[in-house]
Image: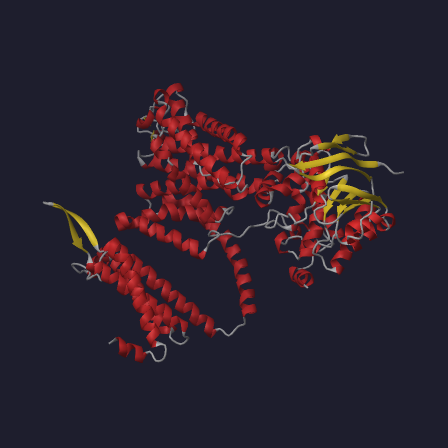
């Protein structure tokens, strides 16, 4: 049964006189991969930044409804609370790892909130109490599990900044997964990947959806990724939503074709 | 003459003479206005006196050094350069310690070549650098290994250095613990030792903000001042003992850290640094101007010394019902007991900071600090509350500064705002940066160098700060990221591998991932 995970209603973001996102509404379903596509400057990343609290939207309601019935209005939350409480995790267009820390450390930082609680805000940790040690072991096991999914176990103790580009992309995704999100927002995860890495990425995303049941919201230019794995596609152009539907529907939408190929004006 | 040298050098000799002449010109241009004249106080007022010997010496040394560098460019002449450099180093060294040398040899005075101690020092260092460079070049040429092999060797060398650091740390701790009982130990050595360890503790404290959280704090001395004054004022007005005041000094400094941190932490980078700089000055200016309480620039004197954990006093006679330390332990009275006690006190406090830092670095909060330094936007997206994490770093770091301040007050017995100027913040920051931000061993070495070297070079009198500056410049050139810039991971999967699931060797992983 389909359940709405994220409902975006009338989202508008203005920067001075520029309207980057103009009255966009869409729904992302639980356990599905929703892609947001559109030409450069269409406002895709702005939508993400509104969703994850880095921008305060000018107008609009962003409702996140978790499976346990808890509801969050994302536009009212600070960035870190969207990650910590609402459990929306994201990656960035230009990868943002902790480059001088190891792969494993990156994944442990993502589990900060639960580990912090387990260490009694560092008191139990400082004295090396057993409950913290168990929590840390569990966190490392979880990290190992995700590293196995992303094929990164062998490089667990490498500095993240020394990894090849494709591995950095995968690491950023599993780092976001380590914070136990209900919605995973990926900003151009396939950018700069070669075809083989791109295929690996597809497998990883499908695996995450199947195994973890996490809802995925995806911005992507690489159509081989978008068309193959998305359940549902939203197309933006000049800040407005111009199409919404399955891959097949969107591909045949004349407005989408016009936006991408610049064909004759379609009313 | 120049013609004959030029022709002796074969082709390229012309340009050699040109280059040397240019060096001499630059040398003259720099030395004539700075060094060639000295003002002396004469009967008729100030008089100028030429220092042409020094000028000539400097220019000659520069030309010789340049010649050495030029000769190193063509292979086959390294031996000459090495010999010349070594000779210069020896001459410089002999001149530097001319009185000792003359004494040992039984001469009336050593016929020194260098006109002054500073120039002797520079000659020695310059010669040594040249000789080392030549030697390195010779050894490189003789070992016919490829670059890849050399890189691999450097890698394993790095591994060895890392192991060596651990051994070094153990030896240093042992040395610190046994210092008072060393044969060469005396009152002066203990005082310098106490001073160095105080700065080690301050460096480790500041390291939490600067090294881990990556926030440039230029006003750390403010927390040091808060700690010192909270004990001094507490003792003066409330008669609080040192042991009672110590935790309060830390707490008070921590709360100042939080008060400062709260409005400031939304700033980043340079703006943050400027505000902390201002905070350091504000505290000092308050201390100067709040005359009724702090006694202003006159400072507070007669700050009580700590007693021996409430069991005995560290004075000649016991007081307040407590016996004196030597009576308590049945020893002969010695004024050094107190000095040694204070030394051990600061060593214990520094050790506490070290243990705390090592532990907290492996906790989520410690990793969050480092993550914040690496990328704070990514931190926010992972649900980390940047404000509280930064505030924790600020408060903890300030608390250590406060503890050190209370110790400073009780050791000196007198404090005034003069002790808490910006230069103190700068020195502590320099210790952290030079040590290699985040490395406890590196910071300890840097503190020993930065605080200890000016003491060692006291023979150089007013020129010792030149030696100090030269040392800093050398570190900047050769170790721009600090003495020990290697970052040790806080946790390794390789150490955690459960039985039956071995982690493949790194070499395999390297081949696989690097493709």
Q: Residue at x 42, y 54 (%)?
A: B475
Q: Residue at x 72, y 59 (%)?
A: A194
Looking at the image, residue B36 sits to the left or right of residue A259; the answer is left
Whole-percent x, y for residue B138 in the image: 43, 72
Q: Most extreme residue toward the right, as rendered? A: A1
Give the image's coloring scheme.
secondary structure
Looking at the image, residue B41 sits to the left or right of residue B332; the answer is left
Q: Quadrant of the C terminus of chain A?
A: top right
The answer to which of A252 and B217 lies nearer the viewer is A252
Whole-percent x, y for residue A147 in the image: 72, 51
Q: Most extreme residue toward the left, as rendered? A: B43
Q: Quadrant of the N terminus of chain A?
A: top right
Please tell me whether residue B138 is drawn above or below residue B407 in the rendered image: below
**Residue B454 visible in rendering:** yes
| Res. B233 image quadrant | top left
Q: How many marks?
A: 0
Please tell me whether residue B255 is drawn above or below residue B93 in the rendered image: above
**Residue B311 visible in rendering:** no
Please tell me whether residue B34 is drawn above or below residue B286 in the rendered image: below
Whole-percent x, y for residue A109 in the image: 65, 42
Looking at the image, residue A4 sits to the left or right of residue B3; the answer is right
| Res. B500 image quadrant | bottom right
Whole-percent x, y for residue B247 in the image: 48, 28
Looking at the image, residue B26 sits to the left or right of residue A102; the answer is left
């Amino acid at each position: 049964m389909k359940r709405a995970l994220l409902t975006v209603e009338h989202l508008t973001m203005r920067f001075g006189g520029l309207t980057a996102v103009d009255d966009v509404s869409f729904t992302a379903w639980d356990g599905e991969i929703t892609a947001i596509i559109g030409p450069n400057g269409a406002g895709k990343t702005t939508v993400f930044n509104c969703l994850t609290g880095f921008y305060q939207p000018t107008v609009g309601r962003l409702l996140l409804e978790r499976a346990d019935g808890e509801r969050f209005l994302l536009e009212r939350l600070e960035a870190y609370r969207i990650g910590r409480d609402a459990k929306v995790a994201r990656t960035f267009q230009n990868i943002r790892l902790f480059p001088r820390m190891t792969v494993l450390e990156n994944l442990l930082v993502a589990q900060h909130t639960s580990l912090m609680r387990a260490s009694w805000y560092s008191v139990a940790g400082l004295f090396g109490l057993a409950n913290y040690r168990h929590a840390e072991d569990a966190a490392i096991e979880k990290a190992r599990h995700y590293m196995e999914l992303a094929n990164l176990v062998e490089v667990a103790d490498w500095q993240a900044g020394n990894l090849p580009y494709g591995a950095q992309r995968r690491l950023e995704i599993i780092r976001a997964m380590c914070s136990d999100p209900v919605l995973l927002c990926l900003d151009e995860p396939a950018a700069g990947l070669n075809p083989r890495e791109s295929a690996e990425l597809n497998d990883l995303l499908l695996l995450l959806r199947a195994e973890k049941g996490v809802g995925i919201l995806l911005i992507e230019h690489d159509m081989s990724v978008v068309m193959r794995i998305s359940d549902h596609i939203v197309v933006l152009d000049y800040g407005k939503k111009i199409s919404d539907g399955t891959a097949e529907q969107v591909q045949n939408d004349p407005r989408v074709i016009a936006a991408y190929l610049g064909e004759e004006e379609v009313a | 003459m120049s013609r004959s040298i030029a022709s002796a050098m074969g082709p390229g000799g012309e340009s050699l003479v040109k280059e040397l002449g240019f060096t001499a010109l630059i040398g003259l241009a720099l030395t004539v206005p700075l060094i060639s004249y000295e003002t002396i106080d004469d009967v008729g007022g100030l008089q100028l006196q030429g220092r042409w010997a020094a000028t000539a010496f400097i220019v000659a040394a520069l030309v010789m050094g340049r010649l050495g560098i030029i000769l190193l460019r063509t292979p086959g002449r390294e031996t000459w350069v090495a010999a010349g450099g070594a000779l210069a180093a020896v001459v410089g060294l002999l001149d530097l310690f001319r009185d000792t040398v003359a004494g040992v040899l039984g001469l009336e005075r050593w016929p020194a070549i260098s006109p002054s101690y500073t120039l002797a020092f520079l000659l020695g260092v310059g010669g040594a650098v040249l000789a080392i460079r030549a030697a390195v070049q010779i050894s490189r040429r003789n070992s016919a290994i490829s670059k890849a092999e050399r890189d691999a060797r450097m890698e394993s060398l790095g591994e060895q250095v890392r192991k060596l650091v651990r051994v070094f740390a153990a030896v240093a701790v042992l040395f610190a613990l046994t210092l008072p009982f060393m044969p060469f130990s005396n009152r002066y050595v203990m005082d310098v030792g106490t001073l160095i360890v105080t700065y080690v503790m301050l460096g480790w404290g500041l390291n939490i903000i600067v090294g881990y959280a990556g926030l440039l704090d230029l006003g750390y001395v403010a927390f040091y001042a808060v700690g010192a004054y909270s004990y001094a004022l507490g003792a003066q007005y409330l008669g609080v003992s040192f042991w009672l005041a110590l935790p309060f000094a830390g707490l008070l400094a921590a709360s100042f850290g939080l008060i400062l941190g709260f409005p400031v932490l939304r700033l980043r980078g340079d703006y943050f640094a400027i505000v902390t700089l201002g905070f350091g000055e504000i505290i000092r200016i308050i201390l100067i101007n709040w005359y009724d309480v702090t006694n202003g620039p006159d400072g507070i004197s007669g700050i009580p010394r700590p007693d021996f954990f409430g069991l005995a006093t560290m004075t000649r006679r016991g007081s307040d019902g407590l016996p004196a330390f030597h009576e308590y332990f049945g020893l002969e009275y010695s004024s050094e007991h107190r000095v040694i006690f204070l030394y051990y006190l600061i060593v214990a406090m520094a050790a506490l900071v070290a243990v705390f830092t090592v532990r907290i670095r492996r906790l989520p909060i410690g990793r969050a600090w480092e993550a914040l330094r690496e990328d704070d936007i990514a931190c926010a997206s992972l649900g980390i509350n940047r404000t509280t994490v930064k505030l924790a770093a600020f408060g903890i770091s300030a608390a250590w500064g406060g503890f050190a301040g209370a110790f400073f007050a009780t050791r000196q017995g007198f404090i005034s705002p003069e002790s808490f100027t910006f230069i103190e913040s700068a020195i502590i920051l320099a210790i952290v940066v030079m040590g290699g931000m985040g490395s406890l061993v590196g910071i300890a070495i840097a503190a020993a160098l930065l605080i200890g070297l000016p003491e060692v070079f006291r023979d150089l009198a007013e020129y010792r700060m030149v030696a100090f500056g030269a040392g800093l410049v050398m570190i900047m050139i050769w170790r721009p990221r600090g003495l020990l810039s290697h970052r040790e991971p806080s946790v390794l999967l390789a150490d955690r591998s459960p039985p039956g699931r071995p982690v493949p060797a790194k070499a395999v992983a390297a081949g696989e991932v690097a493709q």
